[in-house]
Image (spheres, rainbow, N blue to C red):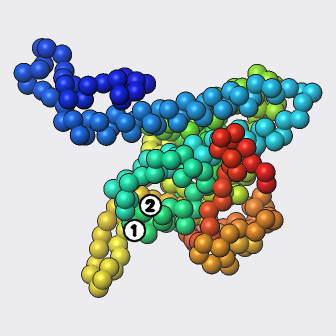
């Protein structure tokens, strides 16, 4: 049903089968909104799959492939940004964006606050020590969002029960399989294992996940307008980098900075950087970039 055009349906006469008609009806305004939203989402995911196929098709050992592999990686990053904004809609100050261009950025404070009504709840290092065998870097936390064969890094099983099959992860696996077919397992593994480090260029905030849920909640106590307020918002990790943590709100990132150097990243204290978000693609009609 989600693949049909909305114009093909008669929303005024949308009824259930005869056996249930006497007792049930669709509430049409909500049905239409849910239908159109889901259909748009399916169409976007289908577009990303098509782009993965198109970009990976000409890959071969005798053709230049570095730029193409980065395009595939950024498609996965775009899908992650889309996934992030699907959660915690109750915290939005308006409607979620519908245009793909709105998601053409890595997740950072200034990008989130375009849509969020309230400040995000940031966690610290102490809340991950029970999971990891060794304290993770910022790249490790980003890699965790994409990986699927990293159980050796955790003290106990980390099954990703409810989020292993999220759309952005399926797109990443699809791209991995295409690279494996075209270039071989060694190149595919190297591409997959670089997710975390390469994502640090675009992402300075990510949801706090656990073995069961993509997005977890945390208890927060604050003073708001002189009154004590307790809530349970979505939990986030936030990182800062010594090369760019001085940038003022909305200031663009420099063209050159050492984002791959994990020694310059710090997420333990939950510091926030307020620089302008960085675009993933220059041109979304071709899913290409020129940086």
Disc nearest the viewer among 2 and 1: 2
Q: Secondary structure at mark 2?
A: loop
Front in this rendered view, residue 93 or 270: 93
Residue shown at the point (58%, 62%) measured from the top left: 108
Residue bearing the label numbered 1: 118
Q: Which mark is residue 115?
A: 2
Label 1: how many Cα within 10 Å (few below 14, some 14–19, many 20+) = few
As helix, strand or loop, the secondary structure at mark 1 comes to: loop
Q: Residue furthest front?
A: 7
Q: Are marks 2 and 1 in contact (CB under 8 Å)?
A: no
Q: CA distance from mark 2 to mark 1?
A: 9 Å
Pointer 2 local density, CA inside 10 Å: few below 14, some 14–19, many at least 20 = some
Does residue 17 appear to the left or right of 282 in the view shown? left
- Residue 275 position by quadrant: bottom right
| Residue drawn at 58 percent across, 32 percent down | 47
Identify the image quadrant of the N terminus: top left
Q: Quick check: 61 above or below 264?
A: above
Q: Position of residue 11 (x, y in %)?
A: 24, 29
């Amino acid at each position: 049903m989600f693949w049909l055009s909305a114009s093909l349906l008669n929303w005024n006469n949308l009824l259930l089968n005869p056996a249930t008609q006497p007792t049930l009806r669709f509430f049409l305004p909500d049905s239409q909104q849910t239908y159109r939203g889901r259909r748009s989402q399916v169409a976007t995911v289908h577009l990303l799959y098509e782009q993965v196929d198109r970009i990976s098709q000409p890959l071969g050992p005798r053709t230049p492939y570095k730029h193409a592999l980065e395009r595939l990686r950024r498609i996965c990053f775009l899908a992650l940004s889309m996934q992030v904004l699907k959660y915690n809609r109750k915290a939005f100050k308006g409607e979620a964006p519908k245009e793909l261009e709105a998601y053409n950025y890595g997740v950072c404070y200034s990008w989130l606050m375009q849509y969020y009504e309230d400040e995000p709840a940031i966690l610290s290092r102490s809340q991950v020590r029970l999971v990891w065998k060794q304290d993770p870097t910022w790249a490790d936390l980003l890699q965790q969002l994409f990986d699927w064969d990293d159980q050796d890094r955790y003290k106990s099983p980390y099954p990703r029960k409810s989020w292993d099959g999220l759309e952005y992860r399926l797109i990443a696996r699809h791209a991995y399989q295409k690279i494996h077919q075209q270039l071989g397992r060694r190149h595919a593994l190297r591409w997959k294992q670089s997710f975390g480090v390469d994502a640090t260029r675009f992402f300075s905030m990510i949801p706090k996940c656990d073995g069961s849920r993509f997005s977890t909640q945390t208890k927060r106590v604050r003073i708001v307008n002189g009154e004590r307020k307790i809530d349970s918002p979505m939990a986030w990790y936030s990182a800062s980098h010594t090369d760019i943590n001085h940038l003022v709100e909305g200031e663009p990132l420099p063209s050159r900075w050492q984002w791959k150097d994990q020694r310059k990243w710090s997420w333990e204290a939950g510091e926030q950087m307020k620089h302008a978000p960085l675009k993933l693609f220059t041109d979304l009609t071709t899913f290409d970039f020129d940086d």
